[in-house]
Amino acid sequence: SRSEIRSIYRTGRGKLRVRARWHFEELSRGQWQLVVDELPPATSSRDVLDRIEQITNPKIKKGKKTLSAAQIHDKSSMLALLDRVRDESGKDVAVRLVFEPKSARVDRQEFVTTLLAQTDLESNVPVNLVMIGIDKKPQQKGLLDILREWITFRTETVRRRSRTRLEKVLDRIHVYEGRRIVFLNLDRVIEVIRNSEEPKPDLMREFALTERQADDILEMRLRQLAKLEALAIERELEKLNKERASLERLLANEGVLRRQVITEIRAAAKKFGDARRTLVEAADAVAPSEKKVADEPVTVVVSEKGFLRSRTGHGHDCSLMSFKPGDGFLQQFECRSVDTLTVLDDRGRIYAIPVANLPGGRGDGSPLSAFIEMERGAQPVAFVMGQPDQTVIFITSDGFGVACHIKDLATRVRAGRTFIKLNPGKTLLPPVVVDPDRPLLGCLSAKGRFLAFPAEEVRLVASGGKGVTLMSLETGDRLVSACGLDDKGCRISGTGRGGKAREAAYGRKAFPAMIGRRGRRGKVLALTWRAEKVEAVPRDASEPTGEPPVGNGVLELVITDGDAPVTIPGSDE
């Protein structure tokens, strides 16, 4: 862009993006191909072909067991667009690389953009303007400083050259004035030279010559002296005097000197200058992050050991898929290929993994370490997926919660970023993605207290943090479960004597008494067993049967482990 070029000119440092030149060739039956006929500096046809081979046939990196997410994504995106490439360069044409698309329906701009982003058809050329200045020291300088110093250098060069030339012209004038004296007394000069034992001092004394003039005469042969012509001497003196006047005027007038420098620069530009060979124009940068991904339905599968993969389409029963020995099915998400999977670790950091980067096919998937870099000892606790404007609530065991939109979880750093501030010794519960059809948030504590309240009461904080109090807890108590609920009620499950699974359901009659405001202590569930989990009543489930009327201080409790329904008094705290 103009601003980038201006910055380079100002600072003397930067980089320029240089792209190959290409054109499209139309073929029969609506087919087409891309032909590259000029490459960036230091890029060869072999470099481009080798790079495409690396992308389409990647090798597992040293120390790794599988291809990285970036390698998988680059391969899939390239093979989705490119069918074949060939080098037709030869004697007749220096560069001719032909790229054939997968089909004529491939978007041409996307085709070019992908090739530019993933190959050396576009490269950065570093600019580092270092020059040896007038002070004879190398230094990085901006273009304006370089031009100023160069003009100063050229001006001084012309001045010194003119001064040296003037000295030579004055010497020649002096010599020719001596020859003019000799010509007027030629016979006497020849006689002195022939007869004198020391002709030099005699010539200087008799004809008032200087030592320089006398040496010039004595260096000439007698035959040359005899051939001296008055007209030739006068013409040479006239020519030298004119040059002297011009040089003296140039050295005495800065304006004349500057015009001479300009004239010489223009002459050099005319002699050595040629047309610009590189087209300079504004264009948007092409980066790997701009690669387009086909928007299609996919199912993301997460294993118990954190292996990720995707399957095209929806409606898969992923629990029936095969997994590595010792591993198994954990979770699945039906989403789009352009969505992002968010990972939450036990230290409150979040990581973002583009769904398009996940490996497909029928393999076992790739481990989390192929996509993100968690701190040593950190473990994933939850995976989050949803619509960008959907609300998700992160919950800690000490009763705090942070709400934000899913789009606020975006991060491009493999090492992620801290989003939840945990108090020492506290843990994270699985986050709750708020469903519009289940607008309540239900919280269950280890000591059997329960509170439900509107999820919208949790303030949205895009940057994360410690959050707000969801449920006030007694000393020694902690949150053990939370989920989204509707007015149909909830189910509480846990463990009874002998490790027997127990469950209680609260329907429309009893559940309203369990709804309060955020930050309250909630109701005490009069349970004889340890409550461990709260769940929403399935949408297709029938209402709990045998519900007696709910009175003051009474919570409806239906035990579903085979015993007859009973009503147990509760607390109004």
Image (cartoon, rainbow, N blue to C red):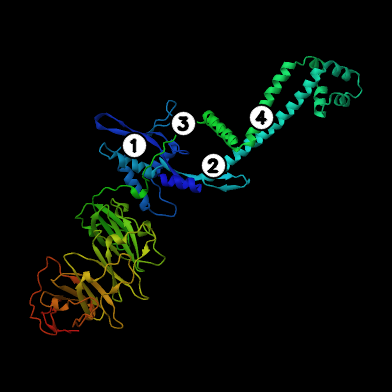
Q: Which numbered tag is attached to residue 273?
A: none
Disc number for residue 147: 2
Q: Residue at x 35, y 72 (%)?
A: 422
> Badge 3 local density, few (<14 within 10 Å), some, or many (20+)?
few
- Whichever of callouts 1 and 2 sits on the residue coming sooner in the sequence is 1
Q: Earlier in the sequence, mark 4 or mark 2?
A: 2
State the residue position of label 4.
245
Closer to the camera in the image, 187 or 300: 187
The kind of secondary structure element at disc 2 is helix
Please give the name of the residue rendered at 45% of the width and 33% of the height, measured from the top-left corner.
277
Q: Residue 84 got which mark?
A: 1
State the residue position of label 3.
275
Q: Nearer the viewer, mark 4 or mark 3?
A: 4
Left or right position of 22 against 528:
right
Secondary structure at badge 3 equals: loop
- Disc 1 to disc 3, how far (Cα)? 35 Å
Q: Are marks 4 and 3 in contact (CB under 8 Å)?
A: no
What is the spatial separation of the Cα atoms under label 4 and label 2, in whole angstroms?
31 Å
Pointer 2 local density, CA inside 10 Å: few below 14, some 14–19, many at least 20: few
